[in-house]
Amino acid sequence: MTFFAGPRADSFFADVGSLFDLLTIRKLPGNAGGGVNNFAGYNVSTISLQVPISMITKNGTRPTDPKDGAAVVGSWITSSRRKTTVLGNVGDANGFKSSSGDWVQIERLGMPLVNEIVVPLGVKDTFNNLKPWQDGAALPIVQDPEPARLLHALYGLNVPPTPRNDIVTVFLTGVPGLNQPPGVTPSEQLRLNVAIPPAASPNKLGVLGGDVAGFPNGRRLGDDVVDIELRVVAGILDPNFANVSPNNVLGDGVDAPAGALLTSFPYQALPYDGYFYDPAKTLKP
């Protein structure tokens, strides 16, 4: 095993200011730049692990056949806090604060942006309290995603009719023949087929770009998950919409991390130097 903990330049890239402002795209259709990477210039506290494949498969093997039932692994993370928090008076010199009670799950994440964009605001708290094996309740949300309705209402794009079974495989079950495990229970996880070798020339659009080693088969730092998911929500996996423009070229206009990714572990770009960094002159770490 190899372990790293420390600051790195934030490798995620997206125009959060536009996407979270009612799914605004600054320069339609979003495949030719024009977006603002709101993660540029920021460092994140990073924990990176590099482990043998045999340590994460259910039977302790290193599968070489992508059809091997043990080749697909799924992962997700959760955040929890104590049920009750008591804060001291404003201006309390001691900064009094205490927490007590059971630990309560307050957030979860597996597939990127499902929680933030696909799940409607009114049920985010409910979704954040669920475990992945309880995600059958989220099936109607995935089959009728709010972003698809916004694309139609704001930009007049025609999208596949509901129920949207074309995107269930991406967000809940894994893609058949790629990263769907046998007897899968619909659940929002980031799934990876470890028997598929890394691509010699990665395509930032992953599977949509013909690169089966990329998102949604796992998630590499350079995968453009925002563009991929926008196009999936717009219907690119539906045979009747696969070649419909601009649905199949949607994006946020941000195409790569601000910092140059490393070619060796831990792969994330070097952190920005707080002393010398000047965002007006450079975005390089």
Image (cartoon, rainbow, N blue to C red):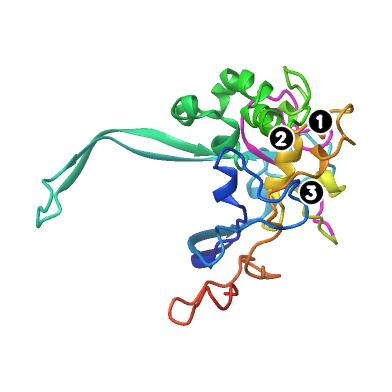
Q: Position of residue 10 (x, y in %)?
A: 55, 61
Q: Position of residue 73 (x, y in %)?
A: 68, 40
Find disc 2 in the rendering and name its residue. 155
CA separation in Å, label 1 and label 3: 16 Å
* Tag 2: amino acid: Tyr
> What predominant SS class does the magenta segment belong to?
loop
Would you say residue 173 sits in the magenta stretch? yes
Judged left or right of residue 175, residue 280 is: left
270 up-or-down from 67: above or below: below
Helix, strand or loop under label 2 = helix
Would you say residue 168 sits in the magenta stretch? no
x 61%, y 69%: residue: 269
Find disc 3 in the rendering and name its residue. 206
The crowd level at tag 2 (other Cα within 10 Å; few <14, some 14-19, many 20+) is few
Helix, strand or loop under label 1 = loop
CA separation in Å, label 3 and label 2: 26 Å
The answer to whether mark 3 and mark 2 are in CB contact below 8 A is no
The N terminus: image quadrant? bottom right
Taking depth in this image into account, of 181 and 34 the one nearest to the observer is 34
